[in-house]
Amino acid sequence: MITHQIYRALRIGIVFLFISGILAPLIYAVWLSFSPDSFLTPPGNEWSLRWYRAFVTDDRWMMALSRSIILGLACACLALFAATTLAYSMERYHFRGKGSLGILVLLPLCIPHAVLGMGLLPLFYISGLWGGMIGLVLVHAMICLPVVYLMVRDKLRRIDPDLEAAARGLGAKPSQVTGRILLPLWGSTLAVGFVAAFAISFNESMVTLFLATPTTETLPAIVWPQLRYAPSPLVAVASVASVIVALVVAMAFGWVVKLVGAKSLTKKG
Amino acid sequence: MKPGPYLLASPAAGLLLGLLICPLLLVFRVSLYQPANGHGFFTPGTWTLANHSSLLENHGIRMVVYTMAFGATVATVNGAISFVLALFLRSLNSSLQNVVFAGITLPKFASVLVILFGLQQLLGDTGPINRLLLASGIITEPLSMIRCFFGALIGEIFLILPYTAILLFAQVMEIDPLLETSARGLGASRWQVFRRITLPLSLPGLVIAFQLGLVWGMGAFLGPLFLGGPENTTLSVEIQRQAFEYSRWPRAAALSVQLIFAIGMGLSIIAFAKSKMTRRLVRGGQ
């Protein structure tokens, strides 16, 4: 009995050691952001919001932050739309080229982003997408596509197609089948997919690095040269800001899903 | 009216063809252009193999070999840690599992750059780990943990581990625990149970985790750039340097083509090894 308790304590100990190890870089970055000095030393007795003030009052950082948020939201909408329609066609139809499409959609996971960036560079250069946000939205949506696709497809696979067939047989219009059957069952996963796409786009730094111009400068595009050549507590603040934004979007979505879910339930009743 | 499958699949297919396949073809084409003469980034309408000549030079080969070795190291270390973690997680109750999952997922909401920034400061010569070790008298000189192979490796593993750990956890959770307990009951040792039951049944997941580790490790850019030393140049780092510091697009494109081929080669070696190993494990089990 006592050995059992020792084992249990040991396990909990290992879990906490592991968690603190994996979260250490993140926590240390947050801690550094409250530094009162211009050196990267963690604040001891004196904590300061000085670098937060500098971050908020600097137009360049704020523009980049808002651009990153807009880019992330637009990318998430597009990626979710493309992934949902693709998942539906892959799960509910048989058509020629389905097998190769299934492989193609996973390919973005296997291509190093440096290679992708090197290919997009001449493409943007030739096609005139250079310096516009539209190109970045499209590229980020493509990068998020495999992850979102795998998420929403797995859920769709577990939704019985007979439910849709039965609704159609009872005379429901396609819009009714989608709105009353498919979306209520699928919706929460779609929301998770949206959040995942936003998080990926918001934190994507590699392709941004290849394609960013002064007019499309996002948060990672400013952070990374600073990180490379002159790390300052401002970088730590930008890091904290990015984590907070990603978490706020995730929580807002969780809340919306709960609200919509409750509403559709009362409607049915 | 119901939209057909082609119409439904077209947004995704358009994104993939336009922004993945098209750039990949362009990389091949640009790698065969002559370098720019004066203006632009390459000379249109020319064909040459000169950009691939680095493969014939000593440092070019060294870079390709280093990239493959780095990828293999990342894949092995990361795969081993993920596997141990997944097996350990399986033995926990679900509330502790959720705590670990929350811990693994939270950094994924943060930018990759945040993680690397934190690691850079933590592991640096004046970072807390070195100061602690110095103060306790275990070491007299600060350990250099960044600007070297170790730093790049740690950085990449921090970025990849959450994905492979979750993947392997899903795989080991599918193993019926009754198989293991009944083998124990029939007199098998712990090692035999692991060797004959747990390992063969986790193999598919292990292979995917290894493949992911290899592909991402070979394509690694940020880890080697921020935490690696000057001699730890992977192909990705060199691609970026050629494209931006020297504006030599054809050279950067040639290196990209080499990287794609190197990854293809690595993946086929794994596929070959997998078929061999599966046969051996199945035979060993009989």
Image (cartoon, coloured by chain):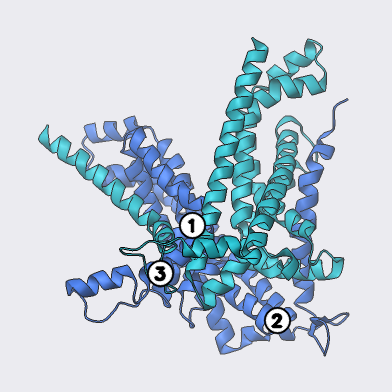
Chain colours: A cyan, B blue
Residue A177 location (% of width, % of height): 76, 20
Q: Residue at x 82, y 71 (%)?
A: A125
Looking at the image, residue B255 sits to the left or right of residue A42; the answer is right
The kind of residue tagged 3 is: Gln
Q: Would you say the residues marked 2 and 1 are in contact, meaning their CB atoms lie under 8 Å apart? A: no
Q: Nearer the viewer, mark 1 or mark 3?
A: 3
- Sequence-earlier tag: 2 or 1: 1
Q: The C terminus of chain B lies in which quarter of the figure? A: top left
Kindly identify which residue carries mark 2: B251
Q: Nearer the viewer, residue A234 or B74?
A: A234
Residue A91 figure quarter: top right
The secondary structure type at the circle numbered 1 is helix
The kind of residue tagged 2 is: Arg
Specify the label residue B183 is tagged with: none
Specify the label residue B160 is tagged with: 1
Specify the label residue B121 is tagged with: 3
Residue B280 location (% of width, % of height): 41, 51
Q: Residue at x 64, y 68 (%)?
A: A114
